[in-house]
Image (tube, rainbow, N blue to C red):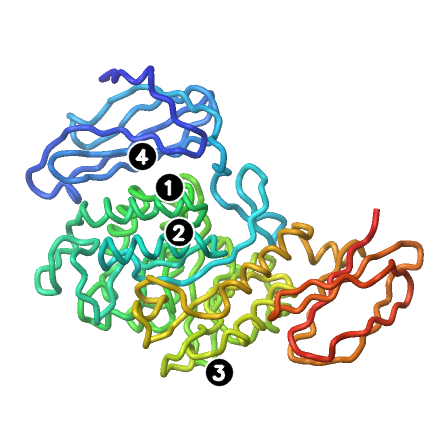
Amino acid sequence: MKELSSSACEVERWGRFELALKGPAEGNPFRDVSLSARFQYRNRIVEADGFYDGDGVYRIRFMPDQPGVWRYETRSSCKELDGACGEFVCIPPSPGNHGPVRVKDSYLFEYEDGTPYWAFGTTCYHWTHYNDELEELTLQTLKGSPFNKVRMCLLPTRDMSPAAFAFAGTCPEDADTTRFNPAFFAHLEKRIDDLQQLGIEADLVLFHPYDKGHWGFDQMDGETDRFYLRYVVARLASFRNVWWSLSNEYDFNRYKTEADWDRLLQFVQHRDPYQHLRSIHNGTKMYKSSSLYDFSKPWVTHQSIQHWDAELTSSWREAVAKPIVIDEISYEGNSSRRWGNISGQELIHRFWEAMTRGGFVGHGESFIDKETKAWISSGGRLYGESPERIAFLRRIMEEGPEDWIRARQEGTYMLLYFGRRQPACTTLDLPADASYRIETIDAWEMTVTPLAGTFSGTTRVALPGKPYIALRVRKQQ
């Protein structure tokens, strides 16, 4: 047993402890050497895989979730790496560190410390695959945006020519799926940390169907898929702001069956010591058909849905008691594709329709004639009309109760959205023994107008007779 000096090491709760060890570099250490560690806090033991990081360096990362002394001991097929032991002290989290996001009460999310989390995501698939200048611009844009989750891919599409990718090699001809590219992952990790500093979750899309045989990553066999996933989880699971999206539009991949996806989701569940949020995203023939994954399966934590009809949120809630995130509900933009050319008004309408029914919605933007082109592909700048109005909706939601659907059932709070309907009035059946204040909200103009006085019992409320109007009704204490 090799005792390592780490008595002065302090790691904040939900921070990242990292152990680096020197070992063999010959052969193929990615495949030939196994490495893990057992981390112990009192009587609790958590096991985490290690990984080879190139140049004879092996690393093990760990995210402690309890303050106090943690002890560890490594296990390895290599004698040089086996039996290294030590300890570190987990200290309280710094301001802004609320831990990983978890599911709460079936339909909601919250951080592990109990802080509420409303998912206001955006799609920016390959923003980490271009260049530092564009990536820094993307981060600055995100900093000024309402978004607290980013969907982002690890693997390239057919039409991309990235400077680096997850596996060894520089082009399809020399891609080596038995080895990884540590430089690619180091860059990705820096960007995940950048998102963490902005309070943004990294929803990592692990596979997608848009390789189309060019790189070969969409048709790897099961053993190679698991080899890839194990390495990704070993490197990235210790980042508290990570979510796992096993695949984008999984059902468009003709090389894998749903049973294959089931097995891979269970594999990620098994390898992840921290049980980050996990889901898988369906494809759709826009405005024609859509077939969702069976989200009742126990290895998915939430429903990641592609669909254009936000009104279905109610039926999805009834079908499966898990949070609903419509990660793709069509994008604001001027793409020639139907999924990428709706107006900002239409996107905002869909946000409000889904959220007032108890779901969460993801943003996307696909303007193809702008300086930085389509945000959903490469990031850069946002040009649409929806982001500031999504920020307005986020403020409205955060001003209300964490569970706005239950509050409506209990009669303490109501957020009623009339959508494209333009009623001149509506009637509310309020309890006669309570007093309520009512506000008219214009979702597009971003205005909140209080109605004079308080209300109880059957109440007739005059409305502006225009689209995108909501009412906020709050019980007075």
The residue wearing badge 1 is 239
State the image coordinates of residue 324 (x, y, percent, origin top left): 55, 61
Asked whether disc 2 touches disc 1, contact meaning CB atoms under 8 Å apart, the reply is yes
Rendered-image quadrant of the N terminus: top left
**Residue 162 vs residue 191: left or right?**
left
Q: Residues within 10 Å of mark 1 (few under 14, many from 20)?
A: many
**Residue 61 vs residue 98: left or right?**
left
Choose the circle earlier in sequence order: 4 or 3: 4
Choose the circle earlier in sequence order: 1 or 4: 4
Assign a secondary structure to mark 4: strand
Q: Residues within 10 Å of mark 2 (few under 14, many from 20)?
A: many
Asked whether disc 4 touches disc 3, contact meaning CB atoms under 8 Å apart, the reply is no
Asked whether disc 2 touches disc 3, contact meaning CB atoms under 8 Å apart, the reply is no
Asked whether disc 2 touches disc 4, contact meaning CB atoms under 8 Å apart, the reply is no
For marks 2 and 1, give the CA distance.
9 Å
For marks 2 and 4, give the CA distance.
18 Å
Assign a secondary structure to mark 1: loop
Assign a secondary structure to mark 2: strand
Say which mark, if any, is on residue 61.
4
Going by the numbered disc 2, the residue's amino acid type is Ala
For marks 4 and 3, give the CA distance.
44 Å
The residue wearing badge 2 is 202
* Residue 352, quarter of the rendered image: bottom right
Assign a secondary structure to mark 3: loop
Residue, x 66% and y 69% (percent of image)?
442
For marks 2 and 3, give the CA distance.
29 Å
Asked whether disc 1 touches disc 4, contact meaning CB atoms under 8 Å apart, the reply is no
The residue wearing badge 3 is 287
